[in-house]
């Protein structure tokens, strides 16, 4: 499954651990939330980066004490129809000021890229190769956005205000 | 009328090209039907019994004449020459070909019409009072706020994959024509003691398998905070709404399971985090939206023009005027409701020719504006009283002057088993038969205000729970069976109807309704006592006795 990071297909340095997989000595690991919370100190002490896979039905606030220490938060779309992780992503970015990698996992398809980018995701485990290849093109599909989110894109309402004021200055 | 600017147009065009790409990928097999299904639903495309059905948004029920002509064009070019207006102020076309849909959308986009979020588990078309901006006594035009919310909810990055569909309706009048209490969020525009605009916010209304009347969650939310408050409700719903069972996924179930107090605490807590954010609406932004709604330059006209006085001699004109013409906030003008319920025809249908002709009439007599109401009728919102006789003649020629607005033949009905893949029973033929039984205008007038609502399955698209008489078609042992309720209503006193007895067969429905009406005529205290009031005074028992005594 290709990983898109920084807008391009990239290598994934992280290895996903199950709840009971023995801990590898080195290397970057992605750990399920339950295991992460249980062994956080030990995990964070070892060499290699640590990321956490956070299920979409668990309160993201529980992760807040660790946000400065994890390298990746991976949120989950069990199917693309289940939109809970969009709320978690916005909370992480906009309320808890998480600045690390925010990864979309699960059924990640092309037609959700724009929504995901707007919610704060910056890396994507894309289900289909063709979708991953079309990432940059798809991300540019829209130039107008009605809602303010943490991605900083200017909203239609505010763009109108700017236009109105610049017209005022010009005339 | 709200005029799209370049920004709105760009977004709609970008959506059309996105959908064109999605259709292309579906046709090439790159997208599976399972993946495509959700994408097409988010753009108003259902797969029905015979073909794809295409639902086009008419935000808050306001249409310009060039838009109505574009809908006529779509009906003619891509469908079978007619469209069906729905209970959520939208229009549906029933025979669209998938490969042609992007072209139809592109044609509509040219006049600022789209089909975004007319289905799917996202925020649906924002609906409002079809008399918005012209109703006497209205606090202010709710469409300004409807448009703000329309924009905010369009392609929302957080709430496009909710547990279930989500509908918002707004009213600014005491008499609720927008049925806000049967919506996921109902907004009643009010002023606080300082004269500032805000909303009473209701939540958790909805029909379907488990109907609920919405409950007030907050008595006053300031206008500038309305987007953040709605966002808080949605964020709670998105995270905690049930996703394990489609029949328990609407917000009404979450509100019911948590209780309104706990639910409102959750929302309040979330709201406190986000209310002082960029979601707060500046006055300047509101004024900008307001400035893009244009209002007619009304003339100073007499209360009673000569034309109207002369036409009063014609009983047919008078019957129509008394039935279909309502007071306007400006002297000398009227609001004219156009019944799409001619005797013997499917409720809410209009042909391409009718739509084109109506657009011409609206240009001539209504400052180029048409409205769509949730009762599946249309309205011309600014007709000078002196033009009423001429308008009536023209409407009558088009078959659009049936004087039955709010009467027993003004039936709300879903498409039912004739079109819909979810339906268990037919709705349209029941409606058609009932309009024939009560075709006599004197009889219908004698009965007075009486709304019959028909749904062909438990999903309740025909709003049967809130019909004064509700008819629900179900399937029992391979047969269509209809359950009859009475006493429901969808207005400010919204109530769910009560079942009056065992289900009846298709052929017997019209007889039973006739019996219900006969019972009412016998039971009412005086001619002015409306059906609803008699049911309220006596309860359902006397109706039950009379209707089922001989069955």
Image: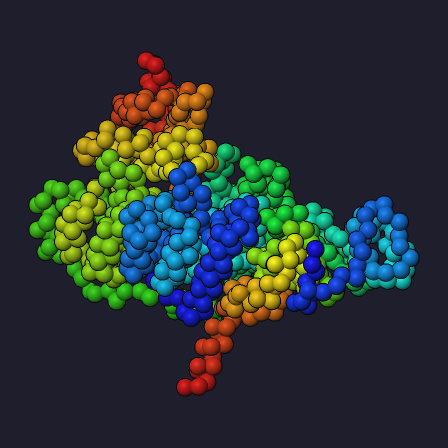
Q: Nearer the viewer, residue A122 or A155?
A: A122
> Measuring 64% from the left and 51% from the top, which residue is drawn there?
A107
Residue in the picture at 87% in, 56% down: A43
Could one spot residue B271 in this view of the protein?
Answer: no
Q: Tell me which residue sits at (61%, 50%) in the image.
A: A80
Q: Where is residue B26 in the image (x, y as percent from the top left)?
A: 51, 51
Residue B1 percent location from the top left of the image: 34, 62
Q: In this view, does B291 lie to the left or right of B340?
A: right
Q: Residue at x 23, y 51 (%)?
A: B353
The number of numbered discs placed on residues in the rendered structure image is 0
Name the spot of residue B512 as percent of width and height, x first. Answer: 32, 22
Answer left or right for B390 relative to B488: left
**Vertical side of B158 occupied by B81: above or below:** above
The reply to whether residue B508 is visible in this rendering is yes
In this rendering, position of residue A137 left or right of residue B467: right
- Identify which residue, B388 or B172, lies in the foreground: B388
Q: In which quarter of the image is residue B359?
A: bottom left
Closer to the camera in the image, B395 or B545: B395
Q: Quadrant of residue A86?
A: bottom right
Reply above or below: B6 against A64: below
Pick the front one: B310 or B17: B17
């Amino acid at each position: 499954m290709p990983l898109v990071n920084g807008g391009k297909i990239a290598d994934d340095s992280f290895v996903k651990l199950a709840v009971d997989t023995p801990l590898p000595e080195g290397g970057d690991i992605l750990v399920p939330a339950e295991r992460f919370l249980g062994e956080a100190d030990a995990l964070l002490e070892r060499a290699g980066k640590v990321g956490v896979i956070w299920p979409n039905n668990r309160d993201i606030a529980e992760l807040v004490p660790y946000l400065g220490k994890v390298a990746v938060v991976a949120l989950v779309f069990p199917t693309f129809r289940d939109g809970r992780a969009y709320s978690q992503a916005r909370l992480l970015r906009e309320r808890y000021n998480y600045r690390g990698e925010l990864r979309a996992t699960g059924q990640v398809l092309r037609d959700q890229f724009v929504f995901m980018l707007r919610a704060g995701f910056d890396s994507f485990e894309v289900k289909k190769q063709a979708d991953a290849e079309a990432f940059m093109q798809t991300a540019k599909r829209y130039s107008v956005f009605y809602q303010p989110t943490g991605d900083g894109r200017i909203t239609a309402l505010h763009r109108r205000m700017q236009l109105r004021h610049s017209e005022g200055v010009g005339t | 009328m709200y005029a799209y600017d370049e920004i709105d147009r760009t977004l709609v065009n970008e959506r059309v090209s996105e959908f064109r790409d999605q259709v292309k990928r579906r046709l090439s097999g790159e997208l599976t039907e399972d993946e495509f299904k959700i994408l097409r639903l988010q753009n108003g495309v259902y797969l029905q019994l015979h073909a794809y059905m295409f639902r086009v948004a008419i935000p808050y029920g306001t249409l310009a004449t060039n838009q109505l002509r574009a809908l006529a064009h779509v009906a003619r070019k891509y469908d079978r020459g007619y469209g069906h207006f729905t209970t959520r102020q939208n229009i549906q076309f029933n025979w669209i070909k998938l490969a042609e849909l992007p072209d139809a959308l592109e044609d509509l986009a040219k006049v600022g019409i789209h089909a975004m979020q007319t289905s799917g588990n996202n925020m649906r078309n924002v609906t409002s009072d079809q008399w918005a901006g012209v109703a006497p006594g209205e606090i202010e035009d709710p469409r300004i706020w409807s448009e703000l919310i329309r924009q905010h909810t369009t392609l929302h990055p957080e709430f496009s994959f909710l547990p279930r569909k989500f509908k918002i309706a707004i009213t600014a009048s005491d008499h609720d024509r927008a049925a806000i209490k049967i919506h996921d969020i109902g907004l009643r525009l009010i002023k606080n003691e300082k004269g500032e605009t805000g909303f009473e916010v209701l939540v958790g209304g909805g029909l379907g398998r488990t109907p609920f009347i919405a409950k007030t969650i907050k008595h006053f939310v300031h206008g500038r905070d309305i987007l953040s408050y709605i966002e808080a409700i949605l964020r709670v719903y998105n995270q905690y709404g049930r996703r394990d069972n489609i029949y328990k996924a609407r917000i009404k179930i979450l509100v019911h399971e948590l209780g309104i107090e706990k639910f409102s605490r959750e929302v309040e807590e979330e709201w406190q985090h986000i209310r002082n954010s960029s979601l707060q609406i500046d006055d300047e932004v509101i004024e900008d939206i307001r400035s893009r709604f244009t209002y007619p330059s009304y003339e100073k006209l007499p209360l009673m023009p000569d034309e109207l006085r002369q036409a009063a001699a014609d009983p047919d004109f008078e019957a129509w005027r008394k039935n279909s013409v309502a007071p306007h906030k400006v002297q000398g003008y009227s609001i004219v409701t156009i019944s799409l319920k001619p005797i013997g025809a499917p409720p809410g249908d209009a042909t391409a020719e009718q739509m084109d002709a109506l657009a011409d009439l609206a240009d001539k007599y209504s400052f180029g504006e048409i409205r769509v109401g949730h009762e599946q009728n249309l309205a011309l919102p600014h007709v000078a009283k002196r033009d009423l006789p001429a308008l009536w003649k023209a409407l009558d020629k088009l078959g659009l002057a049936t004087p039955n607005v709010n009467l027993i033949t003004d039936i709300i009905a879903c498409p039912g088993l004739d079109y819909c893949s979810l339906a268990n029973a037919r709705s349209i033929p029941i409606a058609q038969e009932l309009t024939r039984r009560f075709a006599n205008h004197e009889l219908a007038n004698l009965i007075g205000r009486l709304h019959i609502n028909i749904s062909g399955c438990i999903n309740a698209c025909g709003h049967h729970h809130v019909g004064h008489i509700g008819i629900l078609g179900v399937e029992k042992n391979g047969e269509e069976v209809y359950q009859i309720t009475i006493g429901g209503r969808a207005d400010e006193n919204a109530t769910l109807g009560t079942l009056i007895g065992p289900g009846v067969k298709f052929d017997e429905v019209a007889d039973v309704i006739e019996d219900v009406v006969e019972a009412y005529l016998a039971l009412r205290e005086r001619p002015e006592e409306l059906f609803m009031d008699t049911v309220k005074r006596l309860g359902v028992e006397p109706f039950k006795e009379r209707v089922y005594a001989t069955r």
